[in-house]
């Protein structure tokens, strides 16, 4: 099942078409927040993430992701929402990713009040 690698990191994948036969095409959201995801994890997950044709939301808040990890997300052209609250990314790293993914709303920094 396509969601197993996310579950191994303490996250999960979901979508409106999820089911035993949906496979990767059924996944539209991946939540890896609070899962201690690292840049190395994103490098390892990159091929899987890129194989999800309907991935629209990726949640990486409260993880150890840095600007280096963002480089593994530049091919996610269908991504619409990326959450990076309480990570180690910088405004410069986010700006670089935003240029690669202009259609994506990227939220980062401390949690909003």
Image (cartoon, rainbow, N blue to C red):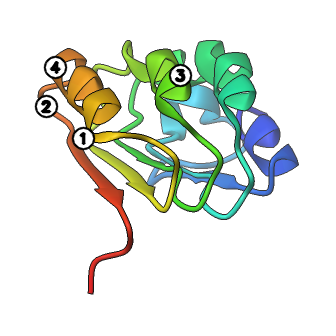
**At which x and y percent is residue 92?**
27, 30
Q: Residues within 10 Å of mark 2 (few under 14, many from 20)?
A: few
Q: Quadrant of the C terminus?
A: bottom left
Dots 3, 2 in contact, CB < 8 A: no
Q: Is residue 35 visible?
A: yes
Please tell me which residue lies in front, 32 or 50: 32
Task: State which tag comes first along the sequence, 3 or 2.
Answer: 3
Q: Which residue is mark 2?
A: 103
Q: Residues within 10 Å of mark 3 (few under 14, many from 20)?
A: some
- For marks 4 and 3, give the CA distance: 15 Å
Query: Tag 2's secondary structure?
Result: loop
Q: Which mark is residue 80?
A: 1
Task: Determine which of the numbered discs, if any, sits on residue 99 in the image.
Answer: 4
Q: Earlier in the sequence, mark 4 or mark 3?
A: 3
The residue at 81%/40% (across/down) is: 4
Residue sitting at 67 percent across and 35 percent down? 21
Under tag 4, what secondary structure?
helix
Quadrant of the snapshot with the N terminus: top right
Residue 80 horizontal side relative to residue 5, left or right: left
* Residue 96 in the image: above or below residue 37: above
Q: Where 47 sits versus 55, above or below?
A: above
Q: Is residue 78 visible?
A: no
**Residue 34 drawn at (x, y percent):** 67, 64
Q: Could you tell me which secondary element the residue under label 1 belongs to?
A: loop
- Nearer to us of marks 4 and 3 is 3
| Residue that appears at 46% across and 17% down | 71
How packed mark 1 is, by other alpha carbons closer than 10 Å (few <14, some 14-19, many 20 or more), is: some
41 relative position to 93: left or right: right
């Amino acid at each position: 099942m396509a969601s197993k690698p996310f579950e191994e990191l303490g996250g999960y994948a979901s979508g409106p078409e999820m089911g035993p036969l949906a496979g990767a095409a059924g996944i539209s959201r991946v939540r890896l927040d609070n899962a201690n995801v690292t840049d190395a994890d994103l490098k390892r997950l990159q091929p899987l993430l890129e194989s999800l044709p309907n991935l629209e939301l990726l949640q990486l808040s409260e993880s150890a992701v840095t600007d280096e990890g963002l480089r593994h997300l530049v091919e996610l052209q269908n991504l619409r929402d990326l959450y990076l609250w309480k990570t180690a990314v910088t405004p410069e790293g986010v700006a670089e990713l935003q240029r690669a993914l202009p259609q994506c709303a990227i939220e980062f920094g401390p949690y909003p009040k």
